[in-house]
Image: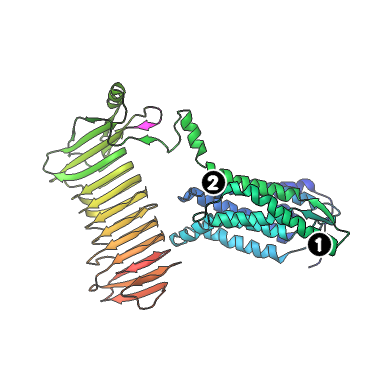
Amino acid sequence: MDRLRVGYGGNWIIAGLAMLLPGLGHCYRGIYDKALFIVSSFLFHLALAYTLLHVLVIEQPLTIAFLILSLPYHYFYAIFNSLQATDEGYYYRNSWIKIAFSLILLVLTIVLLLPLSNTYAFKLQIIYHYPMFVIMSIVMYVVTHLKRKRKPYILMGRITVAALLTLLAILLWLQQIAPIQWVQWGYITPLVFLLELIVLAIYYYWFNRTAMFRLDYWGVFVLIILGSTSYFVMQYSDYPTKILQSFHAPAPNKEQLDGSTGFRYELAPIKLPMDASGEIQFRNLNGYVEIIRDDVDELTLYPVLYVNTEDEEQALDVKQQSYIDVKFDSGILMQSQLPLYNLNRYPRMDVKMVIPNHYELTEGMRIKLEHGALHIEGITILDKLSIESNSAAINVYGITGNVEVSTKQGNVFMKNIDGSVAVQSKKGMVTLINPLDDVQATALNGLLHVITNKVAGNWSLTATVGNIVVKLPRKAHYLLGAKVSFGKISGDRIVEKNSKRYEATVGAAIYTISMYASNYILIE
C-alpha cells in the first residue's frame, strides 16, 4: 500500500485514547494495521494474566515476570508512538506481517478465554512457551531493523543481541534437560560481539566504504532486561519467602505443619447426639481423618494432637488452645481450632470419627480438609458425600450414595462406590476401582486410572495434562469414544497404530464412555 503521512493536531485526544486502550491512538491517526497489532497483543496479555490467576500454573514464574514487564510496556509504547505519529516527518508503511501476527494473537486469546476443559492442555503450552515467544518476536524485529530509519547508521551490536537472545530462548526451551550455565555468558558475549565486528569490518571494506556505525543502545538495554530478568527469576524465585522466614514472619501458604512427632496428646473424646436433623460437616486444618461406622450409640470423635516442639510448657499451651468446635445450626458442624505458634507453625490433629451403625445420613455429609489425609469407609448416605481438600490424600471405600471430590493437590483413591462419582484433581493421580454408576472424573495434571468388571453408568474421563489407563470388561453394553491431542491410543483392542481417535461399540451400547487425554490413553 501507499505510504501514509500524518500531521499535527489533537495530541491530547490521541494520548487519551491510547491510555483508554493501547492501539486506539493509532486507530485515530488511521494506522489501522499497527492499531490492530497493539490491541490484539494487549488483549492476549490480559487473557494470559486472567488464565494465570485461574489455573494452577504458578510453577512458571518466568512467564509471570515477562507478563509484568509486557503489560505496562503496551501503554508506554502506545502513548509515545501514537504521539510520534503526529510528527510531520513521520512516515509509515502498512505491513501484512503485523496483520498476520495480530490474527495469531487473537486466536490464542480465544483459546485462553474458552472455559472448555479440553483446552487446558493448550493453555499450559501457551503459558510455558510464552517467554520464548516474546524473545523470538524481539529477535525477528531486531534482525529486520539493522539500520536506523531516518539516518543511515548501521547499528553495531544488534547482531550480537539477536544471537544472544536466540540462544537464551533455546536454552529456556531446553532448561529441563540442559540447565542454563549463566556463568558461561561472560565468555560467550565478547566472543559473539568480536565475530560481529569482523563481519561489519568486511562489509565496510568490501561493500560500502561510506557506511556509518552507531552502538545499538536500545538492543543492549533489551538484552540486559530480558537476560537479567530470566536469571533472577530462575535463580531466586523463592527468595521473597526466604526473606520473610529470616524475619520469622509467616509467608502466605508457607506455614509449617507438624507431623506425628514431638509431644502427643490424646484429647477427650467428643460424643454428639444424632437426633439433630441436617447436614453433617467436618473441617480440619492439618491431620489424618478417619471416618468409619461401628457399634456406638452416638457420633464420637477421638482427636489426637501432635505438637512438634522441645518445650513441654509451650506444647501444653498449644494443647490448651486446640479443640474441636461443634455447632448445631441446621445440622452438625465440627471444626478443628488449631493455634499458630512459633509465628509460622500449626500443630497436627488426627481425628477418628465413628458413626453409629443404625444412623442414616439423610441430609448428606460435607468434609473439608486443608492438609493431611482422609480415609472414609462403609458409609451409607441418602443424599451426597462432598469432599474438598487443598493438599490431602483422599481414600474412599465402600460408600453407598453419590460422592463428589475436589482437591487441588493430592492423590484420590476410590473403590466400590455404589452411586454416581464426580471427582476433580488439579494435581495428583485419580484411581477409581469398580464404580457402579455414572462417573465424571477429571485429572487436570496427573494420571487417571479406572479399573472395573462392570459398566453400569455413563462415564466422562478427562486427563487434560496427563494420561488415562482404563481396564474395561469385554462383556458389557457401552459405546466407547476416546481422543488424544499429542500422544496416541493403544491397547490390545486397538488395531491401528498411532491412533488419536478410537470408537467402539460393545454389546447393546446402553451406556456411553467418553475419554480425553493430552498424551496417551491405554485401554486394557
Q: Earlier in the sequence, mark 1 or mark 2?
A: 1
Q: Name the residue: 66% across, 46% down.
A: 224
Q: Main secondary structure of the magenta part?
A: loop
Query: Which of these two is toward me, 184 or 428?
Result: 184
Say which of marks 1 and 2 sits in front. 1
Q: Which residues are magenta?
A: 342-346
In this image, 493 relative to 96: left or right? left
Task: State the separation of the CA atoms marked 1 and 2.
Answer: 39 Å
In the image, what residue type sits under mark 1? Tyr
Q: Is residue 18 left or right of residue 367?
A: right
Mark 2 neighbour density, 10 Å: few (under 14) some (14–19) many (20 or more) = some
Image quarter (top left, top right, bottom left or bottom right) of the C terminus = bottom left
Q: Which mark is residue 234?
A: 2
Q: Is residue 69 above or below residue 490?
A: above
Vertical position of residue 32 compared to residue 223: above or below: below
SS for callout 1: helix
- Residue 267 is drawn in which quadrant? top left
Q: Estimate how packed mark 1 is, as few (under 14), some (14 to 19) or many (20 or more) residues with alpha carbons within 10 Å.
A: few
Vertical placement of residue 179 versus 297, above or below: below
In the picture as drawn, the residue positioned furthest to the right comes out as 210
- The verdict on residue 516 being magenta is no
Q: Secondary structure at mark 2?
A: helix
Identify residue for label 1. 203
In magenta stretch: residue 345: yes
- Towards the viewer: 290 or 478: 290
Which label number is shown at residue 341?
A: none
Percent x, y for residue 50? 53, 50
Quadrant of the snapshot with the N terminus: bottom right
Q: Find residue 301 and report its horizontal and vertical position in percent.
A: 20, 36
At x 76%, y 58%, the residue is 198
Residue depicted at 29% across the width and 39% down the height: 287
Q: Is residue 399 left or right of residue 202?
A: left
